[in-house]
Amino acid sequence: MNQIPLDTKGKERATDDALFLERLEIVFKRSLADLQAFAEREECSFDDVRRRIAEWHCKYLFEASSGASQVSVQDRMHSILRSTSQNLESLEGIADLHSFFLVVNPHDPADEGFLGGTLLGREFWRGYRNCGVVGARAFKAHCVKALETQNRHTVAPYPPDSSLVQKKGPASELKKEVYAAVRNALRAASGNRTAEMKWTNHARLDTFGVTLVGWPTGVPMQNPSTLSVAQNTQVLEGLNNGTMYFMRLGETPVHDMPATPAPGSADYSQVHEDPGAFDDSADISWAYQEQGESSPSQSDLRATAQTPAAIYPSQTLISASDDSAEALRMLPSSTFGSEEPPNTSRKRRREETYIRR
């Protein structure tokens, strides 16, 4: 497992670190004294000398950062991990906080993980039961399995992968898969990361705010350990093809939701019928408005309704329900916006007056 090269003896290494910093400080002070003596010999300002030294150091830092682009991705990741671990060690010195972290790469079979953090935290991980290298390998295997499951659901959630249901293997593997699949589906539906399946009493699932729909007929409500291979296969198939699923309380099951009527059917026409199409209060004033004139009076409408068809051969029928609209059942086509010669309305009124006489 990759880690910062530190001595496994905690107290001795901590003492060595303190002595190292003390020796480094002595060298730094000695260098400052040499620089001050150099400035006196050269008859120049000591601040100018220190500024030149700082410029050289900044140049070194900038050149190192510019060359980092040519470093491989693996080296860059390792550098970030080391920097994070050093920051945690600095946090220990500032606030006396201890920590550790473990990083694995599930895409690299040769990767053994990276353990960082403070010395006390790393030693705790190495010495704890089932941790250390064994724990890092177990964590990596868990990440690999989770990554495979995520890719399977992301690439082709429907239909399910038939190889998962039809694969031949020991019955114990099938039971483990049923346990894991049902547990994951329950936790995803309920939002509770610690929810567990109530195999013998599905009604108790209401404690998590969900209910189970579509449990296979003929399969008893028992743990997968007591079910046969065929029964476990039915449960897994139902979960994968969507016939068995968890649903939040108060929601409508998928098979009980009303289907959308097909276009052209009687149900579709009833759903999409305009409720105001035959409303008695519908406004039909557009039917008799003429360009540049106001609406005709009620007497003119009655006279128009009594005009013989011989006078107006071109007629249009209008569907209406109220009395005023019934009088407009037969109107000239010119009423709907066709071109008329000037003074047509005046001539029409004279004809209507003649008819009434």
Image: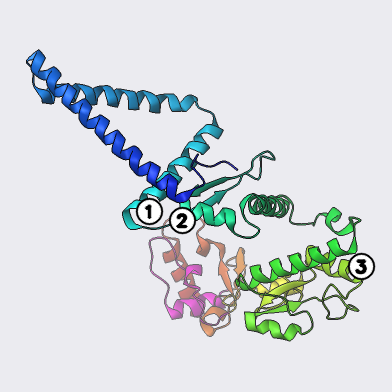
Q: Are marks 2 and 3 in contact (CB under 8 Å)?
A: no
- When asked about the image quadrant of residue 46, the answer is top left
At which x and y percent is residue 25?
26, 35
Q: How is the image coloured?
A: rainbow
On the question of residue 256 being in view, the answer is: no
Query: Of residues 291 and 203, which is closer to you in this image?
Result: 203
At which x and y percent is residue 198?
74, 80
Q: Nearer the viewer, mark 2 or mark 3?
A: 2
Above or below for 300 versus 29: below
At which x and y percent is residue 333?
56, 62
Magenta highlight range: 279-307
| Residue located 63% across and 51% down the image | 136
Q: Which residue is mark 3?
A: 229
Mark sitting earlier along the chain (3/1) = 1
Q: Amino acid at mark 1?
A: Glu
| Residue located 79% across and 63% down the image | 177
- When asked about the image quadrant of residue 294, the answer is bottom left
Q: In this image, 245 relative to 357: left or right?
A: right
- Residue 290 lies in the magenta-colored region: yes
Q: Amino acid at mark 3?
A: Val
Q: Are marks 1 and 2 in contact (CB under 8 Å)?
A: yes
SS assignment at label 1: helix
Mark sitting earlier along the chain (2/3) = 2
- Residue 233 lies in the magenta-colored region: no
Above or below for 256 versus 75: below
Q: Residues within 10 Å of mark 1 (few under 14, many from 20)?
A: some
In the image, which disc is placed on residue 92?
1
Q: Which residue is mark 2?
A: 99
Q: In this image, 48 relative to 104: left or right?
A: left
Q: Amino acid at mark 2?
A: Ser
